[in-house]
Amino acid sequence: MKQSLFIPPAIAGRRLLTAASLLLLLAAACRCPTPTDGFVRADGPNLITPAGEQLHIKGTNLGNWLNPEGYMFGFRQANSARFINEMFCQLVGPDYTATFWRAFKDAYITHDDIRFIRQTGCNTIRLPFHYKLFTDEDYMGLTAAQDGFTRIDSLVEWCRAERLYLILDMHDAPGGQTGDNIDDSYGYPWLFESRDSQQRYCEIWQRIADRYKNEPVILGYELLNEPIAPYFGDTVQRLNDRLADIYRQGIDAIRQVDTNHLILLGGAQWNSNFHPLAHSPCDDRIMYTCHRYGGEPTPDAIRHFIQFRDSLNRPMYMGEIGHNRPEWMTAFCRTMNENNIGWTFWPYKKLHSSSFVAITPPANWDAIIAFAEAPRATYKEIRDARPDQTVARQAMAGFIDACRFQNNVVQTEYIRALELDIEK
């Protein structure tokens, strides 16, 4: 993709340099080149901008856009991308479903959304994505010509225009890294058992890194989201023991083509257990990412994250947090800020509230939810549960309009609970 100058948030808005001072800066840069010039880097537990200033991540997650999750549509049973797609195909047929997904990707996140995120005072966006966006597998309305790079290219341009950093998060890895609905898997983290899936995971990350190796808008690559759910009994420890090696494979693949960007590693069991990473791969551009939902909003709740960070002297960042009372979120934000842990709240947008902006359900969306929750294990059950086609298709078209930014409802209380401000 075409590269252009990215003005990092830390230095945006300063007065223009004179021609003489600009020449002096260019000369200094030529005398002292480093592999990370122009990119965010790690310095002990701190993130440092190209301007040499500390970066404290404040932002949100673009969940549901490129990795659909059922609850953001109001579904409980159809709770992963695969289950949602199957339900829609049973509801209105595969062709209309494909049309819906293509329109959904065009409408759900646009430059308007990114501009608004910046206006709140955020400086970073985390993008969860599905690995299938970089394959020829059937996904979100496309088969042989997936549009992962097209979508990310557009987002990079919007982030550049709004002076935001971007973290790329493989939320759904080949084979599944979690073993639950959040990774769109088959109920087990098969990535850890399959060499074919591991090879595909490395190939995709290498292709992504090769494309964006010179792109300073991108802060880093998050190799896996929430690896290894705690549901697998005695197998959990064996899977945990493999985590560092899976990360090492991804790091090696990326470093063959990109030595500029940070690589983010999350702990096992919902990004909370960092014991498997006590001897994680050594790289001076590694940082770590934790998640936390619930609990007391005090330093004790994140003490083990802080201790792990300090033991390795690397940055730690809270990639997901949210879905709580405003006063809890305010208190936890302050706790993270005081302990040098940046954050991206989850999510930016979904049906109803507890997000930066909310989607209002369109007319007859309750009929879609009723079908999604109905028994559909047999063809008779599908036929009996299916609503009128006109009603169903109009409701799905209505959802596309409802998810556009201009039709969303800004959740002012949520935003201000994070000590952000829609007036910025």
Image (cartoon, grey):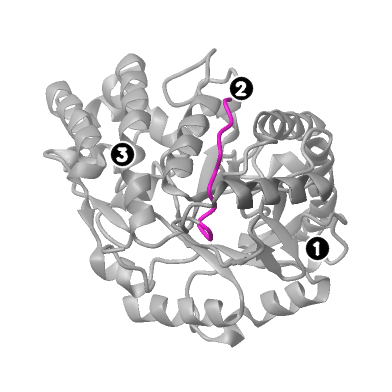
Q: Kindly report which numbered mark, 3 or 2, lies closer to the viewer in this rendering.
A: 2
Distance from the alpha carbon under mark 3 to that under mark 1 = 38 Å
Residue 242 visible in the shown view: yes
Q: Callout 3: few (<14), some (14-19), or many (20+) C-alpha neighbours within 10 Å?
A: many
Q: Which residue type does callout 2 highlight? A: Thr
Label located before the other in sequence (2 or 1): 2
The residue beneath circle 2 is: 135
The residue beneath circle 1 is: 276
Q: Callout 1: few (<14), some (14-19), or many (20+) C-alpha neighbours within 10 Å?
A: some
Q: Nearer the viewer, residue 413 or 52?
A: 52
Whether pointer 3 and pointer 1 mark residues with C-beta atoms closer than 8 Å, the reply is: no
Q: Position of residue 385 (x, y in %)?
A: 23, 32
Query: Within the magenta stretch, is there residue 9?
Result: yes
Residue ID at (30%, 28%)? 382
Magenta residues, start to end = 1-11
SS class of the residue under badge 3? helix
